[in-house]
């Protein structure tokens, strides 16, 4: 019997305007109206739709998270967003270190600083880690995850309620090639072991991400160490996202 409340988060990436977010919220609210609140649900719209999404989901229990955050409070950082700006929209969390951000040159050090800045500001964080196909084929998955986690987690003990970790193998993101429940479980058990160096391993939630859809979500989330899902493509349609929430 786990104490960890499942979390299903939809990462919209660079999709949807404010108006589209409002339409989406109307549908998702209806689809989840009979939910019992056992599963925490969040959507991660682009910055430009955060305000609209917060208003449209108000009172629904669905939380709104940003997709990225900068570690500084303010300053000369063109195109970046600070924690206070996210909080100012009414959003309550953020992704940090998504592989698409890391590929666009977000370093381990920035990921660590941004995770801490967001937590210090009172935001929830979904910290993303995951290996490339080359690393997996070279047998380096565990070493890679260990390095990413050891770079980001020191000093974050005690933050287990606000900090989740998403294991997202890069080769499974947007490819339709989902990790099998067994291989996702194996990697996530490793993530939990390494996270246990800094955090209470029984309390930290670890999500799986990478081509999660309504058909594979239940089998993934039935694994003992998988506490939810970070969903990209399949979160863009409220019907399929609601089906994944129900599967959790
Ligand atoms: P996907 O994306 O579900 O489209 O594979 C997952 C993610 O990048 O978070």
Image (spheres, rainbow, N blue to C red):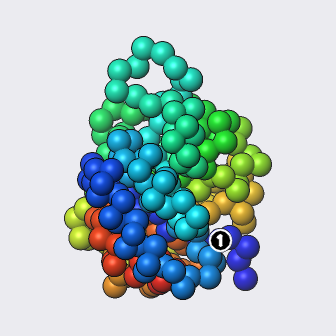
Residue 15, given in percent of the width and then of the height, sits at 26, 53
State whether residue 64 appears in this view.
yes
Report which residue position mark 1 lands on.
5
Q: Is residue 74 left or right of residue 141?
A: right
Q: Is residue 149 visible?
A: no
Of the pair 100 and 44, the residue shown nearer to us: 44
Residue, x 66% and y 52% (percent of image)? 162
x and y percentages locating residue 80 in the rendered image: 40, 28
Give above or below for 186 relative to 169.
below
* Nearer to me, 179 or 57: 57
- Residue at image position (47%, 84%) is 247
**At 67% across and 36% down in the image, what residue appears?**
120
**Left or right placement of residue 155 versus residue 102 in this view:** right
Number of callouts = 1
Rendered view: 10 above or below 212 = above
Percent coordinates x, y for residue 32 in the rendering: 48, 79
SS of the residue at dot 1? Answer: loop
Residue at (54, 23) in percent of width and height: 72
Closest to the observer, 120 or 205? 120
The front one of 46 and 127 is: 46
Q: Is mark 1 within 8 Å of ligand 1?
A: no
């Amino acid at each position: 019997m786990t104490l960890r409340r499942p979390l299903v988060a939809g990462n919209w990436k660079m999709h949807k305007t404010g108006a589209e977010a409002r339409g989406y919220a109307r549908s998702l609210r209806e689809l989840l109206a009979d939910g019992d609140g056992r599963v925490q649900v969040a959507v991660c719209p682009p910055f430009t739709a955060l305000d609209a999404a917060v208003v449209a989901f108000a009172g629904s229990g669905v939380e709104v998270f940003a997709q990225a955050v900068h570690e500084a409070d303010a300053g000369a950082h063109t195109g970046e967003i600070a924690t206070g700006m996210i909080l100012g929209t009414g959003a309550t969390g953020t992704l940090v270190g998504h592989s698409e951000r890391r590929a666009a040159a977000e370093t381990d050090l920035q990921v660590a600083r941004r995770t801490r800045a967001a937590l210090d500001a009172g935001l929830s964080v979904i910290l993303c880690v995951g290996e490339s196909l080359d690393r997996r084929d070279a047998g380096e998955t565990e070493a890679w995850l260990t390095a990413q986690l050891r770079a980001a987690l020191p000093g974050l003990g005690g933050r287990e309620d606000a900090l989740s970790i998403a294991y997202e193998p890069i080769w499974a993101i947007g490819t339709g090639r989902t990790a099998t429940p067994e291989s996702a479980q194996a990697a996530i058990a490793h993530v939990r072991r390494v996270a246990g160096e800094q955090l209470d391993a029984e309390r930290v939630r670890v999500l799986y991400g990478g081509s999660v859809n309504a058909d594979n979500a239940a089998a993934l989330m039935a694994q003992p160490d998988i506490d939810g899902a970070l969903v990209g493509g399949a979160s863009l349609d409220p019907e399929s996202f609601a089906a994944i929430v129900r599967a959790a």
